[in-house]
Amino acid sequence: MLSYPATIPLSSRTLNHLAERIRGHRQQRRSRWRRLEPGRQALLALAHLRNGDTYTRLAAGFQIGVATAWRYVQEAIALLATAADDLATAMERIRRLAYAILDGTLIPIDRVADQRPYYSGKHKHHGVNVQVIADAAGRLVWASPALPGSVHDLTAARTHGIIDALSRADVMTFADKGYQGARGSVRTPFKRRHFRPKLSRRQKAVNRAHAKIRARGERAIATLKTWKILNKLRCCPRRATPIVQAILVLHHVETNRYPA
């Protein structure tokens, strides 16, 4: 088998952060000798999450078994996921924003035995729904646990308590037409209806201004999906939540904005 050197577009700060977590976990468990030291295990996990490398490729590159590569990656993901902020903690930061941007994204998955809950009619393929909150500059602030892809964005936001939390904190929030009816502090564009077939000039102007603001939220989703593992999850959909939470922690460490 041929091999070649590759890079991971992350700083050493992120690698050291994960390695320290792994090292502390091993000391706590008084773990015996492992095939990889904490730094190498951290590098293995980052290669999987950021570059989307498969377990087979990782096993060959790090000269370990495929099962060992899987176990090391899952251990790292679990350690990171436990450090992820829940919505209540994230709201301490969100309520200080000038305004927030709320949007949903579908993370594609492989087909599963029970396909119907995960099929998104909007996107025409299977996936999981993740709600994303961004700041006024379009920077990723928080991402929700994953729900089946058939769940509507507004339903997902209500299920996670996002709408109520934003309204209680009185945070002005911009969202797309999929959140029509959210009320509270969530602002959505005007929508044509059968009793209002045409929008007025003022309403069109408001919609244009709203779209310019909301478009910044796409940057947060794009940032989330720079982690190649999210291009298509090839695992049980129930593992999507810890993967997203782990990535959120690593992103905040990398940007050094909300270090865990």
Image (spheres, grey):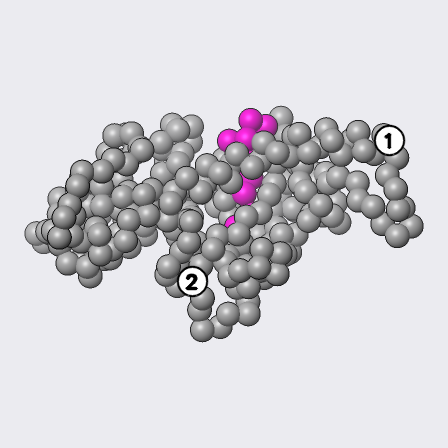
Compared to 155, does 168 lie above or below? above
In the image, the segment drawn in magenta is 130-139
Residue found 64% across the figure and 34% down from its top: 214
* Residue type at the position of mark 2: Asp
Query: What residue does disc 1 label?
Result: 201
Residue 34 position in % (x across, y down): 11, 52
Q: Which label belongs to residue 165? A: none
Tell me if I can see residue 75 in this picture: no
Query: Is 135 colored magenta in this rendering?
Result: yes
Residue 240 position in % (x across, y down): 42, 55
Residue 205 position in % (x across, y down): 79, 29
For the C terminus, give its image quadrant: top left
Residue found 62% across the figure and 56% down from its top: 122
Query: Is 209 colored magenta in this rendering?
Result: no
Q: Earlier in the sequence, mark 2 or mark 1?
A: 2
Residue found 44% across the figure and 42% down from its top: 225
Tally of numbered tags: 2
Q: Circle 2 — which element?
A: loop
Local crowd size for mark 1, using a 10 Å CA cut-off: few (<14), some (14–19), many (≥20): few
Quarter residue 216 falls in: top right
Residue found 88% across the figure and 42% down from its top: 198
Q: Which label belongs to residue 110? A: 2
Compared to 19, does 105 lie above or below? below
Label 2 and label 1: CA atoms lie apart by: 45 Å
Q: Is residue 4 left or right of residue 102?
A: left
The residue most toward the front is: 2
Residue 42 position in % (x across, y down): 23, 42
Q: Circle 1 — which element?
A: helix
* Residue type at the position of mark 1: Arg
